Image (tube, rainbow, N blue to C red):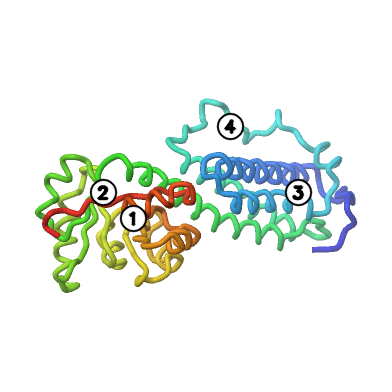
Amino acid sequence: MNECPIGSKLTHFHSPTLRAIDANLDRAAEGLRVLEDVVRFCLNSTTISKHLKDLRHQLLETNRFSSIELLSARDSAGDVGRESKATKTQASDLSETVVANARRIEQSMRVLEELARLPDSCLDGVVFEKIRYAVYSVEKELVGKLVRQDKVCRLTCGRYIITDSIDDFPDALSSGDVIQLSPGASKRSDFWRRATEAGEQRKNTGTLFIIGEYIDIAVVIKADGVAIGGESLPPSVVRGLLDIDQLIGYAAESVTEALEAEASGVDYLLCPDTLKNVLANKINIPIVTPHLSESR
């Protein structure tokens, strides 16, 4: 990028080029604001909200261009690519809204990167590239959080059954409970067979199915999540191994352990009632008291 003072004129650009710059800056800023508000009001994440706000401000403030010229070149009414209301599709949920707006930002950044390559451009293509890659990561994180949020809400709707026997599955499936299959004292190969059979039984039932301890098995059989504890890999590492829609539950045995687990990004805690009562005003994620089946 050539150095240009703030507010420098871009008169060497033709009006259509200025229109393209203006349209893509606006499109990206609007998309960032949508993501920011989803995070702020639906996920209550201060950290991600601030990150998106910083990206939006960086987009509008870092590059040296004349707003007067961009606005003068704007022709919204004459834009042949302007969509009518009839052609706009409806989003079925917030995750689709996030994806749609993230793609708008990413594509706009790519266009601006290319326009920044033009001779004597006052646009900073490096900044656009950094924002594009930052949004790739945010998109993945937000969609995962929103999809998991729906599952987390269902955790408190029924019993959370922990069992090491698939004999308990028919009753649990019919009642809509959450089922966690734990390995108990079985070998990995035996547990793999039981987990695979259990996974087949719960297909098309809508019942949440959690695998205890074995992260790899949870990934392969597409369980709804995995429940880990203090002897497992750190939750941040586990998150990187799972699909974005899979939950991480954590069996906490103390207040300190519970707070650390929440800070590391787990989706819910498994605690006895005594600890759950102590944590009531200290934890912002669901706390589940498991029901142990008689077979355990």
User: According to the image, label 2 marks what residue?
Assistant: 160
Name the amino acid type tagged 1. Leu
The x and y percentages for residue 278 are 42, 52
Dot 3 or dot 1: first in sequence order is 3
Name the amino acid type tagged 2. Tyr
Compute the Cα span from label 4 to label 2.
48 Å
Compute the Cα span from label 1 to label 2.
9 Å
Tell me the quarter of the picture where residue 35 sits. Answer: top right
User: According to the image, label 3 marks what residue?
Assistant: 60
Of residue 296 and residue 151, the one placed in the foreground of this image is: 296
User: According to the image, label 1 marks what residue?
Assistant: 270
Name the amino acid type tagged 4. Glu
* Residue at the far top in the pictured view: 86
Q: What kind of element bears circle 1?
A: strand
Rendered view: 246 above or below 229 = above
The x and y percentages for residue 258 are 43, 59
Dot 1 or dot 4: first in sequence order is 4
Dot 1 or dot 2: first in sequence order is 2
Rendered view: 202 above or below 191 = above
Dot 4 or dot 2: first in sequence order is 4
Q: What kind of element bears circle 3?
A: helix
* Residue located at (61% from left, 48% from top): 49
User: According to the image, label 4 marks what residue?
Assistant: 83
Foreground mark, 3 or 4, reads 3
- Residues at marks 1 and 2 touching, judged by CB atoms closer than 8 Å: yes
Crowding around mark 4 (Cα neighbors within 10 Å: few <14, some 14 to 19, many 20+) is few
